[in-house]
Image (spheres, rainbow, N blue to C red):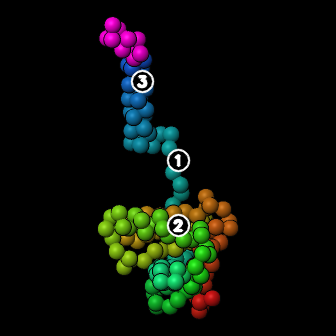
Amino acid sequence: MTARLRRQLFPRGALIGAAALVALAVVSAAAARMTGIGTTKMPDVGAVESRDLRFDDRADGAVVIHDVRDDSIVEILSPGTNGFLRGVLRGLVRERKRQGIGPDLPFRLTRWTDGRLSIEDVATRQQIDFGAFGPTNSAVFARLIQERSSPR
C-alpha cells in the first residue's frame, strides 16, 4: 500500500518532465555562452580617470580615505554617516576576508568614457558599477575621484 501511495505522490511522467526541463535549461545556457547567441555584449570603453584609494577604520568609527599615490588623506567619514559607501566597502572587504587577502592592496575608483563610475578591488578583481544605484549614490563616489585636496 505504501509503494502505491508513493507512486501516486510522485508520478513518473512529472519527474521525467522536470528533469528534461532542467537539462534543457543547462544545455541552452551553455550553448548561449559558447556561441554568443542571445547574449548582450557591452562595447569596450576606456578609463577617463582613476584613483587608487585605501580605506582605514579608526577606533572611533570614522573611516579615513587615503590616496595611495601620495598617501594623502582624501576625506574622513564621521561615524554613522555615508551608509551607502560603507555598505559597498563592507561587501568588498568581506570577499577579501573570504579569500584570505589582507588590506594592503587598494581599491580602484574609475570614471569611464561612457560616463559610468565603478570601483574595483585590485586584490579580488571584483567590480561594482554604480550606474544601477542611481545618481545620488554614484555622487558619493564621484566626489572621491574628483577631490585632490585636504580632508573635510
Q: Which residue lies under the disc numbered 3? A: 18
Could you tell me how many numbered marks the image carries? 3
Residue 100 at x, y percent in the picture? 31, 68
**Residue 65 showing in the rendered view:** no
**Residue 101 showing in the rendered view:** yes
Between 75 and 25, the one nearer to me in the picture: 75
The mark nearer the N terminus, 1 or 3, is 3
Range of magenta residues: 1-12
Q: Main secondary structure of the magenta part?
A: helix
Real-space Cα distance between discs 1 and 2?
Answer: 26 Å
Which residue is at a point 62% across and 75% down the rendered structure image?
81
Which disc number belongs to residue 88? 2
Q: Which residue lies under the disc numbered 1? A: 40
Real-space Cα distance between discs 2 and 3?
Answer: 39 Å
- Which residue type does callout 3 highlight? Ala
Residue 84 at x, y percent in the picture? 59, 68
Residue 120 at x, y percent in the picture? 47, 68
> Does the magenta run of residues contain 151?
no
Provide the secondary structure element on which disc 3 rests.
helix
- Which residue type does callout 1 highlight? Thr
Residue 121 at x, y percent in the picture? 43, 69
- Which residue type does callout 2 highlight? Val
